Amino acid sequence: MTKTSLQSGDKIRLKAADFDFCRELQFNRDEGITTFRNSRILIFDANSIGLLRQNLIVELGWDKAREFFLRFGYQNGFSDFQQIKLSCEYENETELLSLGPIMHTWEGIVKAVPTSLKFDRETGDFSFTGIWKNSYEAEQHKAFNTVATEPVCWSLAGYAAGWCTAFFGSPLLAVEPKCVGMGHTHCEWLIQPPQAFGAEALPYIEALKIFWADSES
Ligand SMILES: [Zn+2]
């Protein structure tokens, strides 16, 4: 069996609900490096990310800013999944997939609460829905902008797509049917294959297809 390159300790066997990110983070103050297994972790103030995001909107326009934040989130979700896969033994696939919303919540990005999940690796069907509360990105968007006509939690949607695509092994997309940035009381996510969405997903597909070149070739 191939040995992994874990930095510390054995794999932790867990149920998703028991995952403790505090115990997984390694703070090395001598080197100024914080890690989660093989990933270097950075901690930023949300306002600084919000300012960067707003500058991208103002300087490059809505479409480019959305594209960059979708990719930023996707990379984050994809990387987190890789570390979890290296670190954990899980009882079944649903437990592994369920760690995505749990990680998202631990990282202080959003409170992610799944509401339904079904997938079939044989047919390629995949549907994962849930509620996002306290999205940092919706908060930051509202601090700078008026009510939007489309969803604004781009890095969250990217994260969900990255995590689930890494899990499923073929492209999956996350789009928000509801978003606080549009005036709703909470955000909702819907994750499914790109072809299952309508025109609302086209900018998301355009942004993320650079990650999917291998799986489509
Ligand atoms: Zn939202």
Image (cartoon, rainbow, N blue to C red):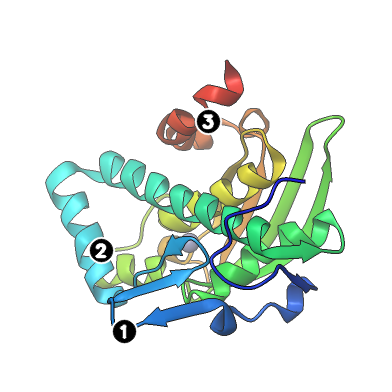
Q: Earlier in the sequence, mark 2 or mark 1?
A: 1
In front of the other: 107 or 66: 107
Q: Position of residue 94 (x, y in %)?
A: 81, 58
Relative vertical location of residue 162 with respect to residue 132 in this rendering, above or below: above
Eye-nearest disc, 1 or 3:
1
Relative to 3, 103 lies left or right: left
Residue visible at 64% across and 50% down in the picture: 190
Q: Which residue is mark 3?
A: 199
Q: Is mark 1 within 8 Å of ligand 1?
A: no
Q: Which residue is mark 1?
A: 29
SS at circle 1: loop
Residue 105, picture quadrant: bottom right
Q: Is mark 3 within 8 Å of ligand 1?
A: no
Which kind of residue does numbered mark 2 sit on?
Asn
- Labelled pair 1, 3 in contact (Cβ < 8 Å): no
Q: Which residue is mark 2?
A: 145
Residue visible at 41% across and 35% down in the picture: 207
Which kind of residue does numbered mark 3 sit on?
Ala
